[in-house]
């Protein structure tokens, strides 16, 4: 990715973070499915079929317009395999025309130098490929062996951010392959992340000891992303629940191929409202709705968006404690931070700029 494009993307990300911190009234991220069909059949996956048709472009355009009107900041296209959609480049161009950040999650098998250049022209912002193993096997064909050539094309031609994600769990035979994949990603100049496999309800499958060791080593490769999300994945890998508030249905939306809004890929059917009928009242309600599956949830996108609201609440708390000029304290002090915020502050990977200040203010009282 060219340096100028990188800084442009960072500026746009900073703008969406600022808007997300300023208001809780709009979705931060929507996951949109243009094509449920996939060319692969990974055994751990429950998000694909082998027969469905692409969503017609006009319907996709209407859905994206509705999401833009709701104030959505980021659209991530996934599937199935979104590159099987014949108008994927037009869809990405439309996301950018509506002022939103455009991302794509693909298995990478359809990438060619020409298609990467078309993504450049459509102004794609970021692309993620999941690679599960070094050699393809009966669990997953998403292997470094089959994809390395495409990674080289991306390194040569892509003018967008590329992230390589590896999955731990899910019956992958050699969990250590995730480290080989991560090192290759870093060598090619990409970022790398580690996903923890979930079950059909989006919650944790216990990891074996060997997988946990790989996770610990992979943290070093994915250090930037780990600093942001380590607190939630560390707990899951240790088999511990997280104390957090899922904001799906409000800050994070999952739009299926039928145009219905769901909490996430693993909780399809709830709320199940057509996107065309989704309103501010739905967003406000779902922001506060408790999700039973939250403690062991592995859906990283939902955790990321919820983090923004954790910070928003912390900043508001902090600001409320600062006396205005000529005033004594303007807000009554709570006895302590909420448990989720305190857990974040205590986590060794947490580097919030104001965290210590917030804590000192609370303890000084
Ligand atoms: S490539 Fe992705 S969508 Fe397709 S079967 Fe594998 S995990 Fe599922
Ligand atoms: S906690 Fe939220 S994101 Fe996680 S599985 Fe439940 S509804 Fe989905």
Image (tube, rainbow, N blue to C red):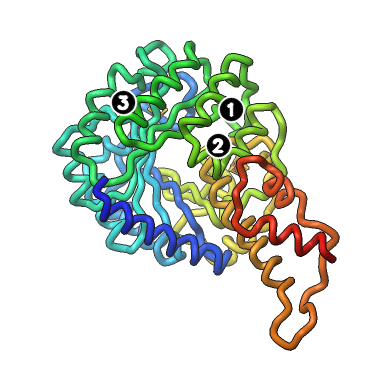
Q: Is residue 241 left or right of residue 118?
A: right
Distance between the alpha carbons at the discs numbered 3 and 1: 22 Å
Q: Which of pointers 3 and 1 lies earlier in the amino acid sequence?
A: 3
Is the CB of the residue bearing disc 2 within 8 angstroms of ligand 2?
yes
**Label 1's element?**
loop
Q: Quadrant of ligand 2?
A: top right
The image's mark for residue 266 is 2
In the rendered view, tell whether residue 157 sits above or below residue 123: above
Q: Residues within 10 Å of mark 2 (few under 14, many from 20)?
A: many
**Is any atom of residue 36 visible in this view?**
no
Q: Which residue is mark 3?
A: 39
Is the CB of the residue bearing disc 3 within 8 angstroms of ligand 1?
yes
Q: Is residue 81 left or right of residue 223?
A: left
Quadrant containing the N terminus is top left
Q: Which of pointers 2 and 1 lies earlier in the amino acid sequence?
A: 1
Residue in the picture at 32% in, 36% down: 189
Which quadrant of the figure has residue 267?
Answer: top right
Q: Which residue is mark 1?
A: 199
Q: Are marks 2 and 1 in contact (CB under 8 Å)?
A: yes
Distance between the alpha carbons at the discs numbered 2 and 1: 8 Å
């Amino acid at each position: 990715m060219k340096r100028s494009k990188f800084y442009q993307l960072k500026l746009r990300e900073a703008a969406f973070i600022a808007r997300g911190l300023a208001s809780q009234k709009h979705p931060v991220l929507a996951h949109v499915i243009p094509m449920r069909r996939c060319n692969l059949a990974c055994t751990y996956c429950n998000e694909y079929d082998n027969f469905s048709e692409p969503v017609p472009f006009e319907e996709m355009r209407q859905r994206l317009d509705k999401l833009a009107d709701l104030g959505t900041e980021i659209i991530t296209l996934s599937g199935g395999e979104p590159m099987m959609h014949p108008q994927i480049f037009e869809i990405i161009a439309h996301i950018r025309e509506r002022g939103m950040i455009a991302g794509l999650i693909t298995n990478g098998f359809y990438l060619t130098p020409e298609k990467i250049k078309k993504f450049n022209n459509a102004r794609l912002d970021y692309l993620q490929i999941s690679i599960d193993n070094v050699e393809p096997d009966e669990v997953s064909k998403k292997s470094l062996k089959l994809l390395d050539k495409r990674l080289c094309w991306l390194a040569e031609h892509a003018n967008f951010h590329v992230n390589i994600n590896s999955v731990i769990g899910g019956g992958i035979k050699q969990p250590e392959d995730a480290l080989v994949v991560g090192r290759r990603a870093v060598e090619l100049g990409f970022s790398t992340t580690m996903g923890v496999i979930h079950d059909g309800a989006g919650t944790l499958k216990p990891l074996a000891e060997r997988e946990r060791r790989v996770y610990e080593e992979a943290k070093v490769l994915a250090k930037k992303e780990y600093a942001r999300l380590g607190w939630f994945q560390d707990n899951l890998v240790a088999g511990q629940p997280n104390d957090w508030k899922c904001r799906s249905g409000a800050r994070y939306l999952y739009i299926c191929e039928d145009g219905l809004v769901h909490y996430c890929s693993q909780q399809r059917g709830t709320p199940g409202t057509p996107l065309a009928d989704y309103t501010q009242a739905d967003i406000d309600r779902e922001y506060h709705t408790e999700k039973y599956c939250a403690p062991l949830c592995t859906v990283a996108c939902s955790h990321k968006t919820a983090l923004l609201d954790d910070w928003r609440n912390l900043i508001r708390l902090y600001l409320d404690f600062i006396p205005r000029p000529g005033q004594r304290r303007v807000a009554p002090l709570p006895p302590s931070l909420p448990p989720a915020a305190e857990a974040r502050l205590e986590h060794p990977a947490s580097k919030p700029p104001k965290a210590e200040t917030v804590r000192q203010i609370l303890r000084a009282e």
